[in-house]
Image (cartoon, helix red, strand yellow):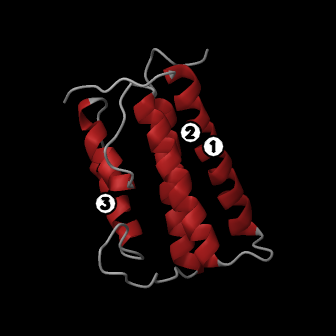
């Protein structure tokens, strides 16, 4: 796989990675106290958090992914870091609620509270994986 170079790797990987962490922190708080936010909103924010974390991870390797989905970015990163199949299975679980980038528009199946907790747990695994696998060149001491 040929690496594609980004203009300002240090600034850009960190922007997306930090944005993903911020979204994920919000999801964790909302899963405990939803307030006016429903499961659909929290689901969408959690998926966005995972996507941003993975984008930041890939950019930390000077790699611009062709895919914007969780599963697609994980697949693309296989040559950059060791990938655990559990993460790919989690992405399939996420897709069971909504077919992302499908030409056939299908309504979102809104996860119930138990399913939402499972989704947030999966995004926590993505966050941990992403943090542990950042390129050694960009790691902060």
Question: Quarter holding the C terminus?
Answer: top right
Q: Tell me the SS state at disc 1.
A: helix
In the image, residue 44 lies at what x, y percent? 55, 67
Q: Residues within 10 Å of mark 1 (few under 14, many from 20)?
A: some
First in sequence: mark 3 vs mark 2: 2
Q: Can the viewer see residue 3?
A: yes
Q: Which residue is mark 1?
A: 19
Per the image, the residue denoted by label 3 is 89
Q: Nearer the viewer, residue 69 or 46?
A: 69
Q: At 31% from the left edge and 60% from the top edge, which residue is drawn?
A: 89
Label 2, residues with CA under 10 Å away: few <14, some 14-19, many ≥20 = many
Distance (Cα) linking label 1 and label 2: 5 Å
Residue lying at the far right of the rendered structure: 35
| Mark toward the start of the polypeptide (1 vs 3) | 1
Asked if the residues shown at circle 1 and circle 2 are in contact, with their CB atoms under 8 angstroms apart, the answer is yes
Q: Measuring 68% from the left and 51% from the top, which residue is drawn there?
A: 25
Secondary structure found at label 2: helix
**Relative image position of residue 7 (x, y in whole percent):** 47, 22
Left or right relative to 62: residue 66: left
* Picture residue at 45% right of the left edge, 43% below the top: 54
- Please name which of the two marks, 1 or 3, marks the residue nearer to the observer: 1
> How far apart are labels 1 and 3 at the CA level?
24 Å
* Residue designated by label 2: 16
Quarter of the figure that contains the N terminus: top left
In the rendered view, tell whether residue 74 sits above or below residue 107: above
Q: Are marks 1 and 3 in contact (CB under 8 Å)?
A: no
Above or below for 29 versus 95: above
Q: From the top left corner, tell me how far across and down residue 21 is, in percent.
A: 62, 44
């Amino acid at each position: 796989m040929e690496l594609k170079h980004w203009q300002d790797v240090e600034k850009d990987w960190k922007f997306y990675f930090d944005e993903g962490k911020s979204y994920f922190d919000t999801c964790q708080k909302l899963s405990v106290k939803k307030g006016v936010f429903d499961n659909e909103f929290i689901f969408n924010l959690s998926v966005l958090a995972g996507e941003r974390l993975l984008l930041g991870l890939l950019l930390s390797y000077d790699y611009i992914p062709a895919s914007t989905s969780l599963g697609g970015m994980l697949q693309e990163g296989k040559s950059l870091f060791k990938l655990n199949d559990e993460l790919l299975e989690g992405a399939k679980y996420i897709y069971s609620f909504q077919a992302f980038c499908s030409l056939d528009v299908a309504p979102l199946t809104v996860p119930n509270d138990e399913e939402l907790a499972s989704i947030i747990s999966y995004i926590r695994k993505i966050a941990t994986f992403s943090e542990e696998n950042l390129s050694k060149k960009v790691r902060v001491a």
